[in-house]
Amino acid sequence: MIPRASLTAGALALVVTVGGCASAPPPPPEVHSADDASAQTLIAEMALERGDCRAAAEGYAAAASHGTAALARRASEVGLACQNLPAAWQSVERWRAVAPEDRSAAIVYATVALKLYRIPEAREALTPVFKSAGAVTEADLVAVIELLSQETDATAALAAVDALASSNASPTMLIALGNVALQAYDFERAERRARDALARDANSAMAYRLLARVRILQGDADGALAAAREVARLDATGGAFALADALAELDRPDEARRELDRLRTATGDGDEVDRRLALLAFQSGDMAEARRRFTELIERGTANDAAVFYLGDIAARTGDKDAALAAYRQLVNSSMAVEARTRAAGLLLERDDRRAAFALLDNYATQHPESSFDLTLAKAHLLADHGDADGGLTLLTAALERYPSHPTIEYECATLLERAGRLRESVQSFERLLAARPNDPTLQNALGYTLADHGQQLSRAEGLIRKALAATPDSPAVLDSFGWVRLRRGDARGAVPTLQRAYRIGHDAEIAAHWGEALWSSGAQDQARKVWAAALAREPDSDALKATVHRLAPAEHP
């Protein structure tokens, strides 16, 4: 399957084209003197004040090209904040050139390099940061690892820092690396880092917490529960719910409920127990029980914004769209404002009220300019999800004027081209992106899946997906693609275990559709029905899943 790009474009807090969406940014104005740099800086700052982020980023980059380290730093910050990666790259290259010993410059340089999937450049910049014995604290290095995993692709971040940071690392650093490996879907490496940490500190609750999570995703229930019990033993306060959480993630809801009932007496924290019981009911598909428990939390005055959000989701799933919209509207200025506004916008689009839907998102972007990039992607996704992939493409094409040559937007353009029925252009777009970033597993998987899904170049499609698996061996999206291409090549029985593993890790409805289809094609129709029924209980609104059931078993899903 082709995953959507992550909708997180957070600020850099540690340190103070293609198809229908091609963009060709004009070159920035040349700067020849300090006076020119000062004038260009002033113009760029004025552009920033009036909200013209592209002009500001490119103006700062031009000014920095002959400016001081301080100016180059400011230009790099503006380029990143404006999601203008060409300008940010130009600025941070200048910053490093004039301040080669500045660790902040090296970290920002690596961040931009990883956003562009330039892993060797990122590793080269980070080497002195991680090898400067005594010059950087362990806490700072952990912060660098966490920053890179949050702000860039986790697979790229892992490739850049794992070898640098793992040698003679402390347990804390090893756990940080293990968490990045987990995000990058490399469970073997994550387990290795957890065990390395335990070899240095046998009583590390955080290492056992990481190990428990790995074991859950690997499907090793006994190992996961053993590790969770160690978390609870070593961290009586923070780890009290570790066993209950593990049981819930292992799809053992009855045992999870019993453990939570025990904890109600043991901890005296009835509100937290009730919150987790509500979540457990929701995740198990028991909407009536989940509604009752979330409502009780709200009535007691002990609920957080998430409880209202879940009530909105429950109302939407059970067909009460008015109640869902009312719940989401309660949260438009809350800690969950973006999620709630996006959900509400989707419901409004179902009513063909595009103006009101986008007003919810645009008003928030006006008040919170830092969210504009994420909300632009959200709007494109919403349009595509509601049958207007061409409208989503139009939005993304316009976005490339503001965020020139941005890899995420270019990737989304390629996916929406396929959804709009423009397969040839989609494939050409992915080919062009992959030529620029030949080792990017996200692009390898996307092109491989697109070809496989349309029955084209199946041998090449499988080769691309295998390359992606080598970089991210436990990614549910890539495993799904691999199972799907095997099914397309006539190996239904061979596809089943791969798709089953993908669903266990990701619990995505589209993966369940593929897994069920592989079972159906291999003669296990009853098992396929069970897979589909369980997945529909989790995600009853999945169009992909419903379409598969209707196609293969129309009598059961008219």
Image (tube, rainbow, N blue to C red):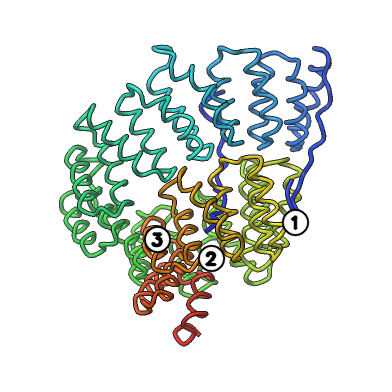
Residue 322: numbered disc: none
Q: Residue furthest front?
A: 459
Q: Residue at x 74, y 32 (%)?
A: 48
In percent of width and height, residue 334 lies at 51, 50
Residue 503: numbered disc: 3
Compared across the picture, whether 212 is left or right of 400 comes to left
Q: Which residue is mark 1?
A: 394
The amino acid pointed to by label 2 is Ala
Q: Earlier in the sequence, mark 3 or mark 2?
A: 2
Q: Residue at x 55, y 66 (%)?
A: 325
In percent of width and height, residue 365 lies at 65, 47
- Residue 348's place in the image compared with 49, above or below, is below
Q: Nearer the viewer, residue 179 or 355?
A: 179
Compared across the picture, whether 105 is left or right of 166 comes to right
Residue 135, quarter of picture = top left
Secondary structure category for the residue under label 2: helix
Secondary structure category for the residue under label 3: helix
Q: Residue at x 27, y 31 (%)?
A: 197
Please tell me how crowded label 1 is: few (under 14), some (14-19), or many (20+) other residues with Cα within 10 Å.
some
In percent of width and height, residue 126 lies at 50, 22
The amino acid pointed to by label 3 is Tyr
